[in-house]
Image (cartoon, rainbow, N blue to C red):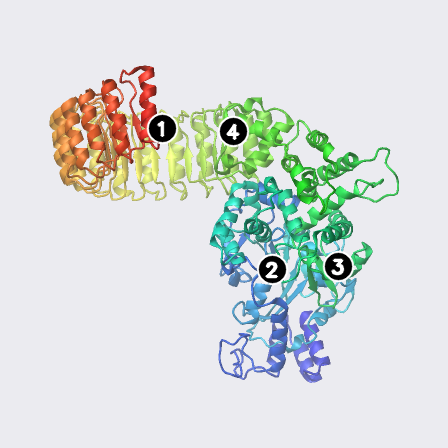
Amino acid sequence: MLLTTIRDSMRKQEVWTGGEASQAHGTGSPAEQMKALVDLLPWKSSQGGQTLQTPDGTPDSPLGLHSNDSRIRRHLEALLGRVGGTLELGSPVHRLASLLLVEGLSDLQLREHDFTQVEATRGGQRPARAITLDRLFLPLSRVSIPPRISITVGVAGMGKTTLVRHFVHLWARGQLSQDFSLVLPFTFRDLNAHEKLSAERLIRSVFPNVGEACLTVTAPARVLLVLDGLDECKMPLDFSNTVACTDPKREIQVDQLVTNIVRGNLFPEVSVWITSRPGAAGQIPGGLVDRMTEIRGFTEEEMKGCLEQMFPEDKTLVGQVLGQMQADRALYLMCTVPAFCRLVGMVLGHLGRSRPAPQDPELWPPQTLCELYSWYFRMALSGEGTERGRVSPRIEQVAHGGRKMVGTLGRMAFHGLVKKKFVFYEQDMKAFGVDLAVLQGALCSFFLQREETLVSSVAYCFIHLSLQEFLAAAYYYSASRRAIFDLFTESGMSWPRLGFLTHFRSAAQRAMQAEDGRLDVFLRFLSGLLSPRVNALLAGFLLTQGEHQGYQVQVAELLQGCLRPNTAVCARAVNVLYCLQELRRTELARNVAEAMGSGALASLTGPSHRAALAYLLQVSDICAQEADLSLGLGQGVLQSLLPQLLYCQSLRLDANQFQDPVMELLGSMLSGKDCRIQKISLAENQISNKGAKALARSLLVNRSLTTLDLRSNTIGPQGAKALADALKINRTLTSLSLQSNAIKDDGARSMAEALATNKMLSALHLQKNIIGPLGAQQMAEALKQNRSLKELMFSSNSIGDGGAQALAEALKVNQGLLSLDLQSNSISDAGVAALMGALCANQTLLSLNLRENSISPEGAQALAQALSSNSTLQHLDLTANLLHDQGAQAIAVAVGENCALKTLHLQWNFIQVGAARALGRALQLNSSLTSLDLQENAVEDEGASALASALKVNTALTALYLQVASIGTPGALALGEALAVNRTLEILDLRGNAIGAAGAKALTNALKVNSSLRRLNLQENSLGMEGVICVATALSENHGLQHINLQGNHIGESGARMISEAIKANAPMCTVEM
């Protein structure tokens, strides 16, 4: 169809002869016709598909399209002139260089207001693959074909039109998508100017010389038709009832023309790119869409970059504005939208440069969205903040003009909002009584954007959708004082009862009933205009001083009355809380926040509590990283919150006594395509195998969850099998905890089968599950094949030496596991010998936990041999074994030779002085160990002295634990001397010894010169008042210590208070425990 149009156009313009046109027409397929068309172009290069050079011969010409034909250059120059040569402020190239490849629209995008989409998702994006702009219209793989219908969505102000102009600009300069022979960009603002239009006239009305476009193409040639701004189409698209049209000369309604183009009835060989806000894009059936992409919002760094572009010479101001954005989470989330970020930056930047007048200090900084927009209007209406070189008129005149503008532009904004109309033409302006002369003034440039269409008409739209909503609310607020009819319908019938409250009730009811949420932000602004701060800001500008101020309490009650009991908390209900925030009635949200903080969720049962809880999930800083709804959340409350929990990044639901029916609900939530939960914890509930099966079914389709914690439930072997079966298919879960679930050997076998094929799981916690040698053997076999698992927690089972030996064989083969926990597994010397033999070969394991087993001095010899040869193990825990002095000495010798080990736990091992001396010698040689734990061993003074001698030369150790180690004053004296020299030790724990006042004095003398120690524990050391006073006075000369524990030193309450005050005075940054 498009080929016929171009051919006829070129023939009429006498670019071709009739014979040449007939030759092109006689070719068969559309691809062949396009090739024939290009072959017949009179300016085609003699080299066929090779590029032509510009007159100056430079390949990198300003247009980038290598042609020496003046007609082509005129066409391309006109195209470049239309789309502009630079990006919009705050739209960095790298942000638009790639889009998010998504699979259709989410329910949230289809149903909700743009603000709600950003707020509910916390400004984040769906997990999606990125696709670069240069590959936007190319096949995704070698076996796929290029998309015919591509849609790019983004909320209002995200930069869709900027993206299109950027793409067309790059294409016209020859820098992008040169496989397209022709790119035809249209906007729906252009199309709205026509009542009826044919496909042929569509092309000719915009590009009358389209046949002159010389583009280097290859067969089959491609053409791209761009339709920008579907959400601005004046008629909705109806794909169910539109009659098919295949005649390119037949004139039909614009919406029917677009429908037929999308269906392929017209221009079937042409690629079509449509941009739209998400809700409007839902008009196009998913089956017709070949590729859908989404523009991502600003990152924090890009917000800063946008502000730096706005205020290039004032870095301090940039920091202040960014800080104010970050201080209000709701505002910060919305600033991920570029247009909104620029608007907010303009206001806050203006306020930062020119602080409010002396009579207005209590009104700054803005604390709500309505206050922010009030400052914007005040800035505009007073002529301040403009850099347009115009003289500011007198405030009285502007205030009068501002009120007049609200009565005209505001009425148009309001009715446009009700009718989903966001683009206005001159006839619309006249219909609403807008003085066209006013539109040329500087004042309107703050609110309206003017654009010439391709059919010589002028289109206007508000700079951002939220400005239209604010103006609409201001008009409604003022008009409700005198209106005796329903402002939404402008019917002539008077209401029985008049007044602002009646009109507000009408607005609230309509907003709650609007399923698409299009009146949500309008209602927020309408509520905010009742705030005393907003009224004070706009008094004399847009509002009358004190107008409607007596209705605040009644409006708050009316809003809360809109919340219905026993229903799910929908976006409309959450919006009520945003309205109360704008009204500055924050008691409800504050009370619920306190209940969350104190673990009193069980008391939150009313509809208003639930809505407030959903609201806090979006805006609370505490909930930003993790929504903790543990301890007492009821099933009914959870069920009502499900629509809002979908968008939490991390969700903790521990200790709520949830049973299997709740898992069915959570499973359905996790199965939803809108689900963005990445982490969920359900620990310490009452989940059995049925609940586990419900969660397993959701894992088959879920694409967001990475962490699932089910510890301390009772899912048993059957529940483990269901989850394991899901892991064979799931490709997102990376961490699974089944601790304390009695899965036994059968459950372990199921998990092992899953690990044999699963390539994503990196952490598996199976502690306390009654798993024996058989289960361990099954897991070992899986580890021989699996390369993705990094952490295996197997503690508190009973795998014994047989299980340990099986795991050892696996470690000889496996090169992926980094951490293995075998605590409390009845492993003796035989099992340890096997594991140590594996360590001699394994080069990847970093952490091994063998505490609370039965390792004797004989097993310690095997450990020592492994440590001497292994160069990768960094963390070894041998707590509570039977090493004794002999075994510990062997390990100490190996530590002296080892260069990889960083932490070593040897507490509760019957170690005595001999091993302590050996460890002291090892520390003088070792340069990698950073933490040594010897608590609950008989180190004594001699051992402490040996360790102290090592500290004088060791520069690696940062933590030394010597609790309950039989150390007295001589040992403390030696440690004090070491601290006076050592510059690396940060933690010294001497709890439960008997260093006395003399030992304390030695340590405190060292503190006067030591600058590295951060934590010192002297609890229960018989210091007495004398020793504690020594510590307190010494801290006046030490500014590095951050925490000191002096509990249990027999100084009484009054002494403790005195010492505590002295320490606070001498070292205010140091925390003291008395």
Q: Which residue is mark 3?
A: 438
Residue 344, horizontal then vertical, whole percent = 58, 49
Element type at mark 1: loop
Residue of label 4: 629
Q: Please, is residue 456 above or below residue 520 in the view? A: below
Q: Which residue is the site of mark 1?
A: 767
Instruction: Say which of 457 and 223 sits in front.
Output: 457
Q: Is residue 367 visible?
A: yes
> Do the residues under discs 3 and 4 have CB atoms within 8 angstroms?
no
* Labels 3, 4: front one: 3
Question: Which circle's residue, 2 or 1, is located before the other in the chain?
Answer: 2
Position of residue 1001 measured from the top left corner of the image (x, y, whole percent)? 20, 25
Q: CA distance from mark 1 to mark 3?
A: 74 Å
Secondary structure under badge 2?
loop
Which tag, 4 or 2, sits closer to the chain's start?
Answer: 2
Residue under the image location 31 percent in, 22 percent down: 1059
Helix, strand or loop at label 4? It is loop
Closer mark to the observer between disc 2 and disc 1? 2
Q: The residue under label 3 is which amino acid type? A: Val
Query: Viewer-proximal residue, 480 or 387?
Result: 387
Where's the N terminus, which quadrant?
bottom right
Q: Single out the mark in the foreground, 1 or 4.
A: 4
Q: Judge whether 385 appears above or below 122 on screen.
A: below
The label number, if any, that marks residue 387 in the structure image: 2
- Residue 108 is left or right of residue 96, and the answer is right
Amino acid type indicated by mark 2 = Glu
Compute the Cα span from label 4 to label 2: 49 Å
